[in-house]
Structures are given as structure tokens and as C-alpha cells.
Image (cartoon, grey):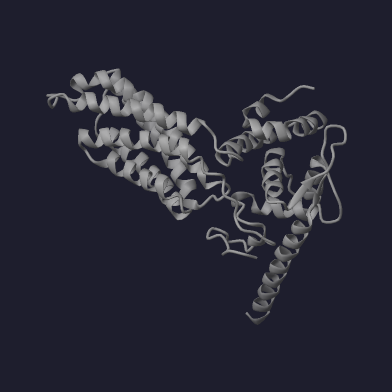
């Protein structure tokens, strides 16, 4: 039996349950490009609506949060640079690594919504991904001394908007700690002060701890007969 | 039904729970299973026959996994790597409730059209 590479993109529990029969279906009826795109979307959906609390958001939030706290603390100990980015370039590489990790952490936090998929969470996830990609590219451009200016702040603010929406969706679902932490993280991100950047990193580190010690079971919506 | 309908549910299909973007696909799957068990490909073929639109494998299994986790459909023992699926008692009740709502909506719509 050959397993379509796309099926390897699904989470482990999903593969153990469905991959054999999906592989049989695909063997019998080879997929076209639309089917492949649909399977890719299905894999993304399975990761965002997992059956059990995944570990990847904990890892992403912990590494990203600690890296951000460290870079922020280094910047905090320095006098204001005479020119942007000045010596802060030394920490930009750390920020560059932390941006995608914390975007993953935000997506991971949204998995606590389970199959609930409110519009706020959907928009928040899209905003976090798009804005973080732009933000990371702009930081890379700054490191390469090709520019970097106020557009960095716009990308960071858009990312904060996405984090805020995910936080609101979690609060709406009754996930108080993570929801409130994400609101705090969004607030820290838009405050133009180095101390706020340290707080942003600390907040994500705290999110990692909560995700680790309170792996909220995926909630089941109410239904007939219950 | 216990609990409030999900806030984002605009389709009136809350008897099967909040299935996000997979609500319509789930209802089509449940209708395809309403006259007996079918395996994945047979469900896809039946949905296409009923709606004129293909149901693709990623959508089928995203919806099936949600329905199975809610106890609305269940897998039967595998036949040649493929599990046939059938509606559970709860699934049959939920589908009946969804169809009642759709019927009521259709009746209201027709009535308004005739009045207008």
C-alpha cells in the first residue's frame, strides 16, 4: 500500500484512524489537483481542530516567548540608539526567529476552541499569519540593511490585531487564562516601549506554561440527546 | 437539545452542533447515510449525485471525523481497508431535527413568496 505524501501532513491521531481507508480511496480513485488541494486544506483543518491537546503550541510559545524576553531584556539594558536600528541589529535576528514561532503559538492557542470556529478566530488566525509573514520579511530586510521603517510597526500592530481576535474568541469560549493572556500580549505589542517588548515575551512564556499544565480538552458543542 | 445554539450558526442546523465550515457537508453526509451504511467513496458519489457537486476527500473526512466524534455516525468493521459508516440513533434524531427545520424554513419561504 502506498500512502499519499499529503496524508503524512495530517496529525498522528487522525492518521492512525483514517489514513488506511483514505489511502484505499485514493488508490481506487487517483486524486486530481482539486482533491489534493482539498486534502491539504483538510490537513490544516485537522491541525487547527485537533482531537487531543497538541504539544507544538507549547514548544512554539516557550521558545518564542523566552527568545523575545531575552532580546527585549538586552535592548532594555542599552541606552537609546542614535539611529535605527543601530546596535539593536544584534537582537533583530532573535526577534526574526521569534516572530514565526509566536505566530505558531497564537495559532496553537486557537486550537483550544476545538471545533468551535467563530469568525473572530478565523479572521484572527488569517491576520496573525499574513501580518507575521510580512513582519518577518521586514525584519529580515532591516537586518540586511536594505531599509526597515515604520512599516515594521504596522506589521506588528496587524499581528497584535490577530492575536487580540483569537484572545477574544477564547474569552468568548470561556478560556479565561489564555484569552486574557493573548489580550495582554496584543496590548504589549502595540506599546512602543522596550519594557512592553519584554512583557510581550514574558506573557508568551506564561502562555506556554498554562498550555502545558492546563491542556484543555477539546470542547464538544452541545447536541441532540445530551 | 441542551444548551444554546452556537452563535455563529446561521444555517439553522444546530441540532448537529457547531461544525463551522463543515455544516453543509455534514448534513449531506448524514442524508447519504439515511437509507443505510456507505463507505467513504460511496458517500462521495451519493453526495455528488444528489447535489451535482463533487465532495472531495479532505472535506469528506473532516466532516466525517466531526460527526463520528459527536456520536452522530459510527464506523462499522472494515471491509477491504474501508469502513462503512452508518447513522447512530442520536444521528438519526439529529438529522430528523435538521430536516424539520429546513422544511419549516422552506414552508415559510414559499409562503412569503406567494404573499409577495
Q: Is residue A206 left or right of residue B26?
A: left
Q: Is residue B16 left or right of residue B10?
A: right
> How many dots with numbers?
0
Q: Residue at x 37, y 36 (%)?
A: A206
Q: Residue at x 64, y 49 (%)?
A: B22
Q: Quadrant of residue A74?
A: top left
Above or below residue A148? Residue A219 is: below
* Quarter in which the N terminus of chain B is drawn: bottom right
Q: Is residue A142 left or right of residue B94?
A: left
Please, which residue is most extreme toward the bottom here? B115
Residue B107: x and y in percent read 70, 74
Residue A122: x and y in percent read 49, 46
* Quarter in which the C terminus of chain B is drawn: bottom right
Above or below residue A122? Residue A151 is: above
Q: Residue at x 70, y 63 (%)?
A: B98
Is residue A100 visible to us here?
no
Judging depth in this view, the residue of A79 and A179 nearest the camera is A179
Is residue A180 visible to us here?
yes
Q: Residue at x 76, y 50 (%)?
A: B73
Above or below residue B11? Residue B48 is: above
Q: Quadrant of residue B106?
A: bottom right
Residue A66: x and y in percent read 34, 27
Please, which residue is most extreme toward the front here? A213
Above or below residue B98? Residue A219 is: above
Residue A154: x and y in percent read 30, 38
Amino acid at each position: 500500500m502506498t500512502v499519499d505524501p499529503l496524508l503524512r501532513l495530517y496529525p498522528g491521531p487522525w492518521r492512525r484512524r483514517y489514513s488506511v481507508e483514505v489511502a484505499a480511496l485514493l488508490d481506487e480513485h487517483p486524486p486530481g489537483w482539486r482533491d489534493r488541494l482539498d486534502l491539504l486544506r483538510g490537513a490544516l483543518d485537522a491541525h487547527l481542530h485537533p482531537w487531543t491537546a497538541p504539544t507544538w503550541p507549547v514548544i512554539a510559545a516557550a521558545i518564542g516567548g523566552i527568545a523575545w524576553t531575552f532580546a527585549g531584556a538586552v535592548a532594555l539594558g542599552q541606552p537609546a540608539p542614535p539611529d535605527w536600528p543601530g546596535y539593536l541589529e544584534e537582537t533583530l535576528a532573535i526577534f526574526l526567529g521569534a516572530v514565526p514561532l509566536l505566530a505558531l503559538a497564537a495559532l496553537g492557542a486557537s486550537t483550544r476552541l476545538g471545533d468551535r470556529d467563530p469568525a473572530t478566530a478565523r479572521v484572527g488566525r488569517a491576520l496573525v499569519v499574513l501580518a507575521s509573514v510580512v513582519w518577518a520579511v521586514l525584519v529580515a530586510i532591516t537586518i540586511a540593511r536594505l531599509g526597515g521603517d515604520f512599516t515594521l510597526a504596522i506589521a506588528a500592530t496587524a499581528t497584535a490585531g490577530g492575536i487580540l481576535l483569537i484572545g477574544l474568541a477564547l474569552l468568548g469560549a470561556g478560556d479565561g487564562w489564555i484569552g486574557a493572556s493573548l489580550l495582554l500580549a496584543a496590548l504589549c505589542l502595540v506599546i512602543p516601549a522596550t519594557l512592553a517588548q519584554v512583557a510581550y515575551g514574558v506573557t508568551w512564556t506564561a502562555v506556554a506554561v498554562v498550555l502545558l499544565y492546563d491542556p484543555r480538552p477539546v470542547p464538544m458543542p452541545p447536541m441532540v440527546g445530551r | 437539545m441542551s444548551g444554546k445554539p452556537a452563535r455563529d450558526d446561521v444555517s439553522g442546523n444546530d441540532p448537529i452542533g457547531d461544525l463551522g465550515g463543515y455544516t453543509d457537508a455534514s448534513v449531506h453526509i448524514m442524508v447519504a447515510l439515511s437509507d443505510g451504511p456507505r463507505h467513504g467513496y460511496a458517500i462521495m458519489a451519493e453526495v455528488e449525485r444528489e447535489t451535482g457537486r463533487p465532495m472531495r476527500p479532505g472535506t469528506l473526512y473532516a466532516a466525517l471525523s466531526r460527526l463520528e466524534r459527536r456520536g452522530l455516525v459510527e464506523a462499522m468493521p472494515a471491509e477491504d481497508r474501508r469502513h462503512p459508516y452508518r447513522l447512530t440513533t442520536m444521528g438519526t434524531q439529529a438529522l430528523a431535527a435538521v430536516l424539520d427545520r429546513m422544511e419549516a424554513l422552506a414552508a415559510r419561504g414559499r409562503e412569503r413568496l406567494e404573499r409577495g
